[in-house]
Amino acid sequence: MYSVDIYTIIDREAYSYQISFVDDKGKVHERSYKREINASKNQKELYAIIDAVKVLKSRCNIKIHTESSYIVSAINQWLEKWQQSRFINAKGVEVKNKELWQEYILLTLKHNVEVIKENGSQSN
């Protein structure tokens, strides 16, 4: 099983990701992608993660590196509760970006995912 690092970068007009992993022969592989889109920071972050995971062809150990505290908390703490409550949050309101979260869940079912908070200027 490959260990894959996914790095996300969010700016005002776009999101991007970079994927890197080392194959069985020790060769480093990298892939990156950037897309301009009119969306919130959280939506861009989710799109970047979803698009990166879609590239993976087999089961992987994934480390998602993000500056977003929201994404780290959502994946590590809230996502399971949201699923149990049918995506109603603690305030009794439907979770924002529900469809993106559902897509994330489906795409990551076969993977082992770890989310790492990186230091940076993004505070969401």
Image (spheres, helix red, strand yellow):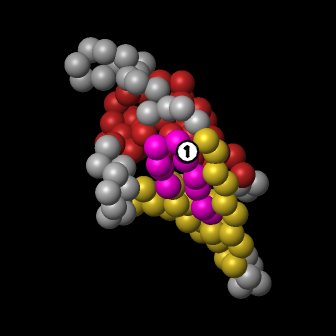
Q: Quadrant of residue 88?
A: top left
- Seen in the picture, residue 24 relative to 88 is either above or below; the reply is below
| Residue 12 covered by magenta stretch | yes
User: Looking at the figure, which quarter contains the N terminus?
Assistant: bottom right
Instruction: Give me the residue at 65% from left, 71% from top.
Output: 21
Label 1: element kind: strand
- Seen in the picture, residue 56 relative to 19 is either above or below; the reply is above
Q: Position of residue 95 (x, y in %)?
A: 38, 23
Residue type beneath disc 1 = Ala
* Residue 51 makes an appearance in the image: yes
Q: Position of residue 104 (x, y in %)?
A: 55, 38
The overriding secondary structure of the stretch rendered in magenta is: strand
- Label count reads 1
Q: Nearer the viewer, residue 82 or 116?
A: 116
- Seen in the picture, residue 83 relative to 15 is either above or below; the reply is above
Q: Nearer the viewer, residue 12 or 86?
A: 12
User: Looking at the figure, which quarter contains the C terminus?
Assistant: top left
Q: Residues in magenta?
A: 9-19
Farthest residue, direction bottom? 26
In the image, taking residue 57 as reference, residue 60 lies left or right, namely left
Instruction: Give me the residue at 31% from left, 15% from top.
Output: 93
Q: Position of residue 98 (x, y in %)?
A: 47, 24
Q: Quadrant of residue 3?
A: bottom right
The residue beneath circle 1 is 14
Q: Nearer the viewer, residue 99 or 9?
A: 9
Q: Position of residue 17 (x, y in %)?
A: 58, 55
Instruction: Give me the residue at 40% from left, 24% from top.
Output: 96
Category of crowding for the residue at label 1, using alpha-carbon neighbours closer than 10 angstroms: few (below 14), some (14–19), many (at least 20): some
* Residue 62 makes an appearance in the image: no
Instruction: Give me the residue at 66% from left, 60% from top.
Output: 32
